[in-house]
Image (tube, grey):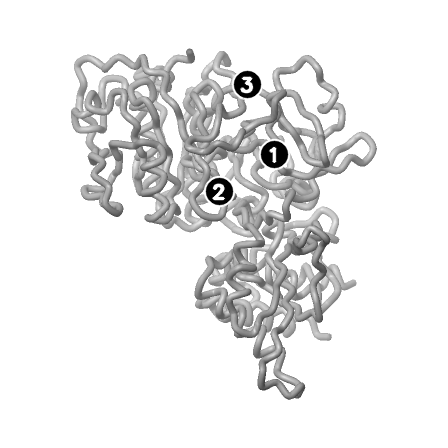
């Protein structure tokens, strides 16, 4: 499964479900400015764990919390390696 | 009796309480009052503090401790119908608000408007000799919150009031000062002689972090969920705290490591506290859980023990009692059952969840039964069981298992499960706040009922 489109789709889908107005999910968008709140991220991370079988927030050692959409995606790429 | 809070302030030093657009110089309260010359009218009364801003609430506490008989701190999100119940049960005859008008239900309580921007000069400060009760509201209950009675002594039990004042100390907290965690930060600030940055009404986290950075914050506190959110904000890079504190939720290893990676030279402590039990202990070794030898301390002021799997605390910081509630706050030996389940592994104890399946979503406690009651009202639902799923972002999120009710007209033909799930989520969204809406729904053939007649719940 391709990571990037899956992640973008989940971010957009959860935003829609939570009635959040979101920016277009490009790499440089700041996650907290994207319109998503903590609860949205919690849901996105749990759905991605179901879809991809990884949760980088729990599995990556010395985790650096992502601040942009690009960093969020690369965290998953790093964990999938 | 501890000296009233007002005595912690000193006009010789320039320390302040800040919110997003205001600055209250604490020294100005030495010879001043924001209560429009009416402070004496509040003597001996039970007073509800129901302000829009945290700054106004903090000012009211400083001014009224030692004058009011009882101060009830109204959290910002308390529904109007609960406010009426709280006022009746707490026998409140006065309301301090930062609004010009204030009306809740049929209440005939007298309104006192507090204006932080209008400090009147007071020639002689009133005597502050009343042993004021401080009443805090719990967040965990379905329905009207429980009211927990403290005194300034129990609230400040964990704070070293004799330490040399540090005028350069600037606290910032993601908590609200009207809840136990935030109130601790306010009291630490005042006892320590420093300043504090509070978030303004509706201020975004990024904005608050930027403001804290501009005020040169030195000490920061919040829940693990607050911190996860903060670390995802570029504004956090502008802050250079000398001390970081976490409490209010389980601090897991990833968030402790995440903070260390972000602020490599800052000491990080995670504390255990609850509104009822008070501050019990803090851990500073950067590891999740707490050393098991804390359970063996026989001589300290705070005693811990584990009984039936949950952490029990006896301490002089424990609240006195519940108000208007017969339920005992502690057992016959004086221990408060925190309801936090603890597991011992070797020399370390770890928090594993809440008894009774209470779910903690980013510091907000959720009772599964409340959500089940909503789901069960849906015409297609026979039975539901709400549980939690671990989340590295908010600690936990809410999930639900449902058993579908066959319709009389059902001919056994397959229905569209995804449509039903969406329908249930939409239904919950209309009746519940976002953190209580199940983020995932699973259709199951049946749910186990125990011999007691209760739904079998599994602790996640």
Do the residues at pointers 3 and 1 share their chain? yes
Q: CA distance from mark 2 to mark 1?
A: 14 Å
Residue located beneath label 3 in the image: B316
Residue B33 appears left or right of B347: left
**Residue B69, horizontal then vertical, whole percent:** 32, 22
Q: Position of residue B39 (x, y in %)?
A: 21, 23
Q: Which residue is mark 1?
A: B338
Which residue corresponds to the image point at 72% horizontal and 54% vertical from the top-left?
B450
Mark 3: give few (<14), some (14-19) or many (20+) Cα within 10 Å: many
Mark 1 lies on a secondary structure that is strand
Name, please, the residue furthest toward the right.
B346
N-terminal of the pair, mark 2 or mark 1, is: 2
Residue B87 - label: none
Chain where mark 2 sits: B
Q: Is residue B428 above or below residue B5?
A: below
Residue under disc 2 on the same chain as residue under disc 1: yes
**Where B194 falls versus B423 (above or below)?**
above
Kindly indicate whether the residues beneath marks 3 and 2 are on one polypeptide chain. Answer: yes
For marks 3 and 2, the one nearer the N-term is: 2
Please, what secondary structure does the residue beneath circle 3 have? loop
Image x and y of residue B364, in percent: 52, 47
* Cα separation between marks 3 and 1: 15 Å
The answer to whether residue B260 shows anywhere in this view is yes
Picture coordinates of residue B154, whole percent (x, y): 49, 21
Q: Which residue is mark 2?
A: B139
Q: Secondary structure at mark 2?
A: loop
Image quadrant assignment for residue B144 = top left
Image quadrant occupied by the N terminus of chain B: top left
Q: Quadrant of residue B41?
A: top left
Which chain's residue wears label 3? B
């Amino acid at each position: 499964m391709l990571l990037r489109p899956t992640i973008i789709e989940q971010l957009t889908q959860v935003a829609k479900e939570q009635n959040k107005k979101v920016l277009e999910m490009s790499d440089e968008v700041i996650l907290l400015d994207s319109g998503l709140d903590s609860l949205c991220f919690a849901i996105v991370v749990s759905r991605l764990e179901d879809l991809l079988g990884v949760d980088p927030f729990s599995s990556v050692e010395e985790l650096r919390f992502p601040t942009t959409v690009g960093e969020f995606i690369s965290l998953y790429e790093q964990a999938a390696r | 009796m501890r000296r009233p809070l007002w005595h912690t302030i000193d006009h010789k030093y320039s320390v302040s309480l800040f919110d997003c657009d205001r600055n209250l110089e604490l020294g100005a309260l030495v010879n001043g009052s924001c209560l429009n010359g009416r402070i004496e009218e509040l003597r001996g009364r039970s007073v509800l503090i129901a302000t829009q801003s945290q700054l106004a609430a903090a000012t009211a506490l400083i001014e009224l401790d030692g004058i009011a008989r009882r101060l009830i701190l109204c959290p910002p999100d308390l529904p109007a119908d609960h406010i009426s119940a709280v006022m009746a049960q707490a026998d409140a005859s006065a309301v301090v608000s930062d609004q010009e008008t204030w009306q809740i239900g049929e209440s005939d309580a007298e309104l006192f408007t507090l204006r932080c921007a209008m400090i009147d000069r007071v020639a002689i400060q009133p005597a502050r000799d009343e042993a004021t009760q401080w009443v805090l509201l719990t967040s965990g209950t379905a329905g009207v919150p429980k009211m927990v009675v403290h005194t300034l002594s129990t609230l400040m039990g964990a704070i070293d009031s004799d330490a040399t004042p540090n005028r350069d100390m600037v606290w910032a907290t993601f908590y609200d000062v009207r809840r136990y965690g935030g109130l601790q930060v306010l009291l630490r600030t005042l006892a320590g002689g420093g300043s504090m940055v509070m978030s303004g009404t509706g201020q975004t986290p990024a904005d608050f972090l930027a403001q804290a950075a501009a005020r040169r914050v030195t000490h920061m506190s919040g829940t693990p969920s607050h911190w996860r959110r903060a670390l995802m904000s570029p504004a956090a890079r502008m802050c250079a705290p000398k001390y970081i504190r976490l409490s209010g939720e389980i601090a897991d290893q990833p968030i402790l490591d995440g903070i260390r990676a972000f602020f490599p030279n800052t000491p990080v402590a995670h504390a255990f506290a609850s509104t009822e039990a008070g501050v019990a202990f803090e851990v500073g070794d950067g590891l999740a859980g707490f050393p098991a030898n804390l359970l063996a301390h026989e001589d300290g002021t705070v005693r811990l023990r584990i009984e039936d799997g949950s952490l029990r605390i006896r301490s002089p910081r424990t609240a006195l009692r519940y108000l208007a509630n017969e339920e005992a706050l502690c057992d016959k030996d004086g221990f408060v059952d925190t309801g936090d389940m603890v597991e011992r592994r070797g020399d370390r104890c770890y928090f594993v969840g809440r008894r009774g399946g209470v779910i903690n979503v980013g510091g907000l406690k959720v009772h599964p039964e409340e959500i089940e009651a909503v789901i069960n009202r849906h015409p297609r639902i026979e039975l539901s069981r709400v549980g939690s799923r671990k989340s590295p972002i908010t600690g936990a999120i809410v999930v639900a298992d449902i058993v579908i009710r066959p319709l009389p007209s059902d001919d056994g033909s397959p229905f569209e499960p995804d449509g039903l799930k969406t329908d249930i989520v939409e239904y919950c969204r209309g009746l519940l706040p976002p953190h209580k809406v199940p983020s995932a729904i699973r259709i199951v053939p049946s749910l186990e009922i125990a011999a007691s007649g209760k739904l079998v719940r599994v602790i996640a």
